[in-house]
Image (spheres, rainbow, N blue to C red):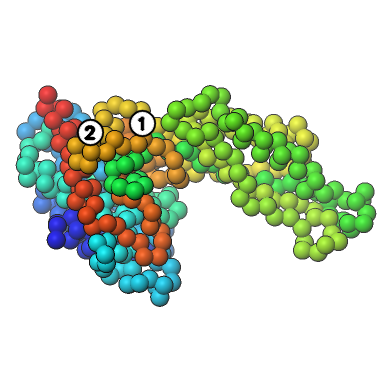
Amino acid sequence: MSRTLQLAEQLISRPSVTPDDAGCQQILGERLAKLGFTLETIESGPADFQVTNLWAVRRPTAAKATKTLVFAGHTDVVPTGPVEQWTSHPFTPTHRDGKLYGRGACDMKTSVAAFVTSIEEFLQAQPEPKLTLALLLTSDEEGPGVDGTVVVCNTLAARGEVIDYCIVGEPTAVERCGDMIKNGRRGTMSGKLTVKGVQGHIAYPHLAKNPVHAVAPALAELVAINTAGGWDGASNPYFQPTSWQISNFHSGTGASNVIPGSAVIDFNFRFSTESTPESLQQRVHAVLDTHKVDYTLAWTIGGLPFLTTPGELVTAVQDAIRDETGIETELSTSGGTSDARFIAKICRQVVELGPVNASIHKIDEHIDVAEIETLKNLYLRTIKRLDAALAG
């Protein structure tokens, strides 16, 4: 059994459902301390939702550091769902048919284990690297995300800490480890639109004002803007066109003879770097105002988009994947959001690289055992390449 597999199993056995770290970061910190890392625990959140964050950093002793590489991830997992539906207990690491089963096996305790063992192997071979190495771990990635990575990033920014490269261990592969990495993510912004009307008897529409009828033409126009990427001012080769989607529509009393007095519509933007929250908000308000809709609208920005164009980090990761697997990896910005959205504010080069994502958040979550060492080697090769570049 490899050291990465052993550590992954040790972490999976801890029931670290958000925000409970369940001692995972202590396990990792003890190993990192032996490698010369300085450990800092940053706790945040109310007493009934205490989040544990770990910032661990190792700076060169023989030479001044010129670059910093951070591995970022989370030790928390989503709830298991009905335990009786699992083939084996979700917090008992179990092997079947060449796969390791358990909650967090894929998202993302194996990646976190591979962070640590790749660093251990690297420092064993290169005890005096030029590169500063660091880990940023949180127990609030699967939850609200307000007391986790964002708190650490704000703390580092306030100190003037410089981060040059960051690898986030989110599951990014489609069929084989290394076949896809994320070099960016779309932003997310939600709106809650309340349309005002006048409730009345459905047989006397002249005595009422139907908010559904009032807003329908505006909604049709907003839907039509999705066609051919109409929200963005220009196309972007790395992003899908910005999309506007309705998620919920509530109106009416439940009776068939009552015109509703209001309608509440929840919608969401997933947007590229070609758009901004301000430009999208202005466009929506303009459409509603043109159709003379009587409304209020509350906005929530969940995260801004980010993009790492090909450069030092992307090249190092691509080369590592090619050398280890023979795969020409695909760059992608698809999928939902991740904590990389916070890190990108203080680090210009951020990529996500992790295992196959097919079983994440599912009953019987698993990872192919054979790919665990592959993942560790991808991280190890990337560290070596970035350090060698500093050495000249």
The quadrant the C terminus occupies is top left
Point out the tag, 2 or 1, that comes first from the N-terminus: 1
Q: Which residue is mark 2?
A: 319
Q: Which residue is mark 1?
A: 308
Few, some or many C-alpha atoms within 10 Å of disc 2 (few <14, some 14-19, many ≥20)? many
Amino acid residing under circle 2: Asp
Looking at the picture, how far across and down is residue 72, in whole percent?
29, 45
- Left or right: 271 in relation to 167: right
Q: Secondary structure at mark 2?
A: helix
- Left or right: 59 in relation to 363: left
Does residue 374 appear in the picture of this structure?
A: yes
Does residue 160 appear in the picture of this structure?
A: no
**Which residue: 45% across, 35% down?**
305
The quadrant the N terminus occupies is bottom left
**Which residue: 10% across, 43% down?**
123
Pick out the residue farthest to the bottom.
84
Looking at the picture, tell me which residue is in the foreground, 121 or 35. 121
- Left or right: 335 in relation to 297: left
Snapshot quadrant of residue 309:
top left
Q: How many marks?
A: 2
Snapshot quadrant of residue 383:
top left
Few, some or many C-alpha atoms within 10 Å of disc 1 (few <14, some 14-19, many ≥20)? many
Vertical placement of 367 versus 197: above or below? below
Gap in Å between the C-alphas at discs 2 and 1? 16 Å
Looking at the picture, how far across and down is residue 282, in whole percent?
63, 31
